[in-house]
Image (cartoon, helix red, strand yellow):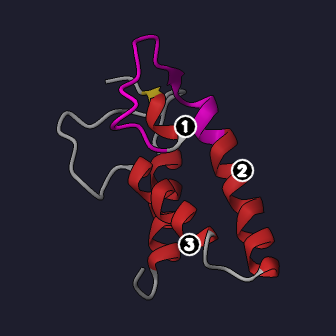
Amino acid sequence: MWPGAVADALARFEWAFRQPGRWLNASPVRQSGLEVEYARDELEEVMLHLPPGARRDLGRLIARIDDEFERRTLPNPGPVNAATVGGWWWSRIRER
């Protein structure tokens, strides 16, 4: 992790959630590190290294992010490749 990684990850979600429409739009081209799923991976990694109080505080923010992300995406009806899937957020799909 680098200084500002948490702020950057939270800013990516804030930008994505401000976009109009009910569903999150999918990028026509996936760019490693720019998708909100990567930001969620970074937040998960940070949680592993925080002291308990900070972990609880960030966990409350992440819970709200997860709720909104789940609300604005759809379950993937296809098979999930267990070798490539990370957290549950990678098994969600978005509109194009």
Report the residue marked by disc 3.
46
Q: Which residue is mark 1?
A: 88
Residue interval drawn in magenta: 68-86
Ranked by sequence position, the earlier of labels 1 and 2 is 2
Q: Secondary structure at mark 2?
A: helix
Marks 1 and 3 in Cβ contact (< 8 Å): no
Q: Residue furthest left?
A: 29
Q: Residue at x 46, y 48 (%)?
A: 16
Residue farthest front in this picture: 83
Q: Amino acid at mark 2?
A: Arg
Disc 3 residue type (three-letter): Val
| Residue 70 is a magenta residue | yes
Estimate how packed mark 1 is, as few (under 14), some (14 to 19) or many (20 or more) residues with alpha carbons within 10 Å. Answer: few
Disc 2 crowd, CA 10 A, few/some/many (<14, 14-19, 20+): few
Q: Nearer the viewer, residue 78 or 25?
A: 78
Local secondary structure at mark 3: helix
Q: Residues within 10 Å of mark 3 (few under 14, many from 20)?
A: some
Q: Which mark is residue 64?
A: 2
